[in-house]
């Protein structure tokens, strides 16, 4: 019935997350709040890790893409679940290090890393730096030589695959700000340069074709293209690439009608391609990394708001305004993302209305969903938006000086705060 198995409805007709009554959570923590289901997050981590073990003999590492939702507690969970971590900024490195995350299991991404960020990665012995461009390669080499270190790097390759997803989150095609293109010879030139550059150890290649992808075929194709390139490097440069990072991008359920494939199916099919292609091309089986973000946390987070104004505009639509909006969920305004919405306090009632859920920002486009089926909704109801665990809190802002919501973790009917609600003091903290 729901987008995640962690959700349910209790005898009071209230939506539950991780066994916690969302109405009671609203009383305890106020609204808006985001609640995650810890067991479900851990279950997702375990499924990824298990698939890597069963389908690729454990010869790999599953790195949680922390951009989906980064905080100390998520880093601690990933550490306990024997995952790696994909980070993309100094702030994400800082969070991981502060949480005590083992730095050798961190992969550092980004198309424009600063010297400070690269230095931070070197100082903290980050396991792999995914180099995006030649200029970065040269700067990294200089920085590493200064400290007498050798930077273990991967090169980010655009495999030339156009995955069917929103254009803002598509990254594998030639027209992308990320990485080196294969078609133009740019990628091969970068490999040669990396092999010759001091203080650089080129361990592997990386690709990421996009996000919220349901089809497995583009992932299979990317794996084939990358192994072919590894073989071409062996033949033309005489250099053996040891690792292959295939990125993330696995789609999740936003609506009940969405049908993502189980992750194990992805891993099985991609492993077959990697093994067959490596054998055919006579290259050593690479150590594989994958970087799921959304699929670890997306469906396991729920945002709960209090309904304020309800405005019926005859023959036009009904606006239901909530006490959050694009500040905690900018995904509708950015990508017109679909979401299931419901009255958390009337979860057993049928959805008889269609409404537009609006935020409280001074901006007409500040909507969370249009034409959304929902129960009969009135001021004072609690409105839950499901599948808000990925790229919601992490992309939240303080527009209109609205504080970011509190984030809680639910497990077996108990809850705990993992990120405190921002206060007005927090918001003026850096004002001078
Ligand atoms: N690896 C790399 C190099 C990435 O750039 C990304 C996502 C991932 C892994 C994780 O992808 P995932 O498994 O989460 O799809 N803000 C957008 C999504 C941007 C994705 C950015 N990169 C959204 O809200 O849909």
Image (cartoon, helix red, strand yellow):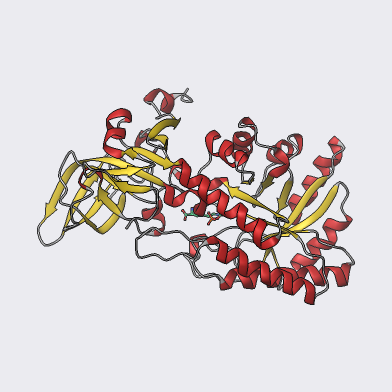
Q: Name the quarter showing ligand 1.
A: bottom right
As drawn, the residue found furthest toward the left would be: 314
User: How far across and down, in percent of the image, does residue 398 sit?
Assistant: 40, 37
User: How far across and down, in percent of the image, does residue 429 sit?
Assistant: 46, 24
Q: Is residue 392 above or below residue 223?
A: above
As drawn, the residue found furthest toward the bottom would be: 280
Q: Name the residue located 30 percent from the left edge and 55 percent from the top edge.
A: 369
92 vs 402, left or right, is right
141 vs 364, left or right, is right
Q: Name the residue located 41 percent from the left edge and 35 percent from the top edge.
A: 408
Q: Name the residue located 28 percent from the left edge and 33 percent from the top edge.
A: 24
The N terminus lies in which quarter of the figure?
Answer: bottom left
Q: Is residue 110 above or below residue 223?
A: above
Between residues 361 and 240, which one lies in front from this camera angle?
240
User: How far across and down, in percent of the image, does residue 121 sit?
Assistant: 72, 39
Between residues 218 and 399, which one lies in front from this camera angle?
218
Q: Name the residue located 48 percent from the left edge and 48 percent from the top edge.
A: 297
The answer to which image quadrant residue 372 occupies is bottom left
Residue 215 visible in this rendered orientation of the protein: yes
Residue 159 visible in this rendered orientation of the protein: no
């Amino acid at each position: 019935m729901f987008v995640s198995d962690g959700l349910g409805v209790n005898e009071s007709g209230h939506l539950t997350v991780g066994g916690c009554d969302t109405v009671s959570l609203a009383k305890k923590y106020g609204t808006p709040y985001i609640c995650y289901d810890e067991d479900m997050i851990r279950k997702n981590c375990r499924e990824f890790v298990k698939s890597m073990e069963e389908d690729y003999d454990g010869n790999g590492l599953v790195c949680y893409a922390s951009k989906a939702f980064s905080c100390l507690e998520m880093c601690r969970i990933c550490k306990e679940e024997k995952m790696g971590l994909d980070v993309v900024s100094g702030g994400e490195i800082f969070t991981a290090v502060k949480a005590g995350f083992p730095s050798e299991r961190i992969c550092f991404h980004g198309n424009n890393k600063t010297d400070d960020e690269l230095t931070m990665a070197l100082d903290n012995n980050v396991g792999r730096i995914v180099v995006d461009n030649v200029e970065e390669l040269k700067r990294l080499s200089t920085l590493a030589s200064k400290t007498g270190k050798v930077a273990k790097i991967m090169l980010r390759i655009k495999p030339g695959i156009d995955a069917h997803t929103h254009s803002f989150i598509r990254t594998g095609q030639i027209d992308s700000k990320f990485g080196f293109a294969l078609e133009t010879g740019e990628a091969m030139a970068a490999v040669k340069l990396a092999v010759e550059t001091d203080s650089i150890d080129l361990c592997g290649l990386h690709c990421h074709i996009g996000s919220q992808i349901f089809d497995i075929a583009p992932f299979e194709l990317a794996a084939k293209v990358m192994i072919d390139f590894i073989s071409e490097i062996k033949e033309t440069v005489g250099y053996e690439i040891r690792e292959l990072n295939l990125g993330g991008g696995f789609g999740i359920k936003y609506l009940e009608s969405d049908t993502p494939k189980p992750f194990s199916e992805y891993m099985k099919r991609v492993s077959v391609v990697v093994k067959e292609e490596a054998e055919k091309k006579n290259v050593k089986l690479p150590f594989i990394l994958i970087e799921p973000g959304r699929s670890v946390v997306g469906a396991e987070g729920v945002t709960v708001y209090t309904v304020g104004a309800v405005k019926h505009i005859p023959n036009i639509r009904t606006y239901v305004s909530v006490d959050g909006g694009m500040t905690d969920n900018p995904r509708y305004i950015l990508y017109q993302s679909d979401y299931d919405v419901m009255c958390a306090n009337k979860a057993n009632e049928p959805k008889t209305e269609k409404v537009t859920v609006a935020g409280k920002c001074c901006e007409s486009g500040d909507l969370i969903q249009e034409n959304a089926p929902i129960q009969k909704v009135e001021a004072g109801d609690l409105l839950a938006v499901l599948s808000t665990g990925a790229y919601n809190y992490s992309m939240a802002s303080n527009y209109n000086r609205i504080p970011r919501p509190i984030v809680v973790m639910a497990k077996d009917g108990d809850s705990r705060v993992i990120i405190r609600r921002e206060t007005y003091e927090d918001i003026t903290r850096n004002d001078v």
